[in-house]
Image: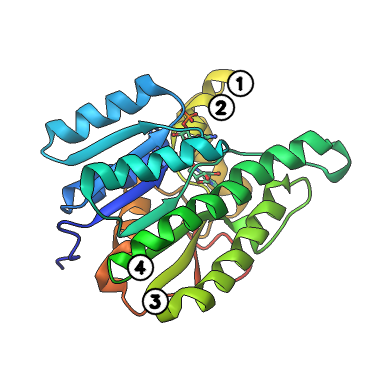
Amino acid sequence: MDLGLNGKVVIITGSSDGLGASAARTLAKEGASVVICARNLQKLQAVTTEIAAAGGNVMAVQTDVTNPAHLENLVAQTVQRFGRIDALVNNAGRAAAQAFEQVSDAAWDDDLALKFHAPIRLSKLVIPHLRASGGGSILNILATGGKTPAAASMPSSVSRAAGMALTKAMSKDLGADNIRVNAVLIGLVESDQWVRRSASTGVPLTTIYSTLPRDNGIPLGRVGQAEEFADLIAFLVSPRAAFVSGCAINFDGGMSAAV
Ligand SMILES: NC(=O)c1ccc[n+]([C@@H]2O[C@H](COP(=O)([O-])OP(=O)(O)OC[C@H]3O[C@@H](n4cnc5c(N)ncnc54)[C@H](OP(=O)(O)O)[C@@H]3O)[C@@H](O)[C@H]2O)c1
């Protein structure tokens, strides 16, 4: 199936590593021009070199999404280089899961700054450009905890639940402009965050990936792969998903208790 992504311009936040980098690779292979961003310039440059070497059209903009001036620069540089924006994937995030009484005020503020306020600010900056393109897509990458918050899952599960409400409300506001807004709720997927967990705990990565499905009751019996995530993202931001808006799709191998 041709996704119709040729010539489309897609910004993906948190794309120097893990799932965001994988989505950037796939979107570039599908013909989109991709703008990747994160804080670590070296990692960004490595992904840029790899995508460009494979023939992809890519630009990296060093960005801390919690810094409003960085977001303005990201959008300005994208428009300057590519002249348009067709899709935004709000993906930058990190794990943050503790019991309620352990979460400090600062941890609540930090999590909401990264996972809630940053996507709001960046979406506001991007929307006029989506309108100018005749419509487009905003995709918020969340986590299954947003639908089914567990014990010791804060602040992330609460920030993600806010992201779900934001997704639905924005889809209602922006549909008349042919702007689709959706969310993908991640369960457990192979990515660099697990590589770092392995390094910090000394538990081999293969052991982590083999015990997670059992410990978390994943019906498909395995964790997801970054490339599988990337395929879903490519479809959702593409014109082939033209009638999909206002939904939150579980990407979790059936793990979540809620549809
Ligand atoms: N993998 C999973 O099992 C899983 C489960 C649930 C939810 N998720 C969510 O899925 C998304 C991707 O996760 P992942 O596993 O790919 O994570 P990852 O491997 O840790 O990658 C996170 C990316 O976000 C960037 N980032 C972090 N803070 C940032 C900031 N302030 N500004 C700009 N970029 C920032 C990181 O680069 P820098 O550090 O260089 O900025 C990196 O490129 C996240 O939102 C995560 O919470 C993942």
Q: Which mark is residue 131?
A: 4
Q: Position of residue 22 (x, y in %)?
A: 32, 42
Left or right of residue 243, residue 160 in this image:
right
Q: Position of residue 114 (x, y in %)?
A: 60, 42
Determine which residue is flagged by label 3. 177
**Distance Cα–Cα, label 2 vs label 4:** 41 Å
**Distance Cα–Cα, label 2 vs label 1:** 6 Å
Q: Nearer the viewer, residue 109 or 70?
A: 70
Q: Which mark is residue 197?
A: 2
Q: Nearer the viewer, mark 1 or mark 3?
A: 3
Left or right of residue 31, residue 80 in this image:
right
Residue lying farthest to the right in this orientation: 101
Q: Nearer the viewer, mark 3 or mark 2?
A: 3
Q: Which mark is residue 162?
A: none
Discs 1, 3 touching: Cβ within 8 Å: no
**Distance Cα–Cα, label 3 vs label 4:** 6 Å
